[in-house]
Image: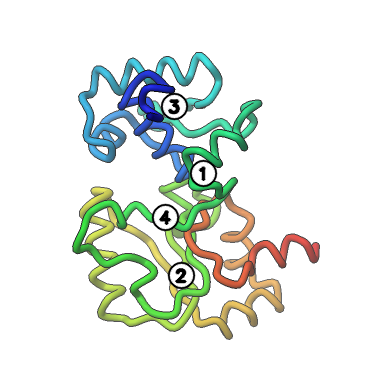
Amino acid sequence: MIEQLFGSKTRVKLLQLFFSNPNRSYYVREITRKIDEQINSVRRELANLLSIGILASDTNNNRLYYEVNQKYEYYKQLAIIFGGGKVGKTDKTSTTEDKGEVTIKSLGNVELALYTGQFTRDESSGIDLLIVGDINQTKLGKFISELEAKEGKEIRYTVLTDDEFRYRQQVKDRFLSNVLASKKQILIDKNQKLLSKTSEE
């Protein structure tokens, strides 16, 4: 029904990808892999969504990247339809797309997980993935290996216990401050650590 409403299966898949990952940037070949559609139809629909203003584009290292335009007039309404109602963040991860893979939620008691760095094209954080919680190291190793294989690049990641995270937050640790101030995609924020921090400031 949504395909009929929006006129194209490719367009619906693109909207689901971008609104489920609001701070992530993708280039064309990466998009075609993720949504499993022909490159020509992907290019055509990207041009349509760009001209409407739903997407924004930017060139980096001679490669054109696309991401959802969060300033678009109907962004919140479309996020409810295509992003599962999570405006500005998502609990989905790119590694839940294929069955049999290790997901972030299966790593243990994950309090907080977020993408930054290469995923959001903001290198101020110095890392690509932050995970906070009580994590199974064996599953973590498998998860990182699968993520690197899927993304085709090395992933720089940091794992903190909940106590370490709270202590570093309390002493305004420079590393953590840089990560939290960077452009990020929140995958999991179980106890709304980032929301509560924002409201205190």
Of 118 and 133, the residue lying toward us? 133
Give the number of the mark in front: 3 or 1. Answer: 1
Badge 4 or badge 3: first in the primary sequence = 3
Badge 3 or badge 2: first in the primary sequence = 3
* Residue depicted at 39% across the width and 39% down the height: 17
Of 120 and 67, the residue lying toward us? 67
Q: Is residue 71 visible?
A: yes
Label 3, label 1: how far apart the Cα atoms are: 16 Å
Q: Residue furthest right?
A: 201
Judged from the image, the secondary structure of the residue bearing numbered disc 3 is strand
Label 4, label 1: how far apart the Cα atoms are: 13 Å
Which residue is identified by label 4? 92
Which residue is identified by label 2? 131
* Residue depicted at 23% across the width and 37% down the height: 33
In the image, what residue type sits under mark 3? Thr
Badge 2 or badge 1: first in the primary sequence = 1
For the image, the number of numbered tags is 4
Give the number of the mark in front: 4 or 2. Answer: 4
Of 166 and 46, the residue lying toward us? 46
* Residue depicted at 55% across the width and 49% down the height: 86
In the image, what residue type sits under mark 1? Asn
Judged from the image, the secondary structure of the residue bearing numbered disc 4 is loop
* Residue depicted at 40% across the width and 65% down the height: 157
Label 3, label 2: how far apart the Cα atoms are: 29 Å
Number of other residues with Cα within 10 Å of mark 1, as a class: few under 14, some 14 to 19, many 20 or more: many
Using the rendered view, name the quadrant where residue 66 is placed: top left
In the image, what residue type sits under mark 2? Ile
Which residue is identified by label 1? 23
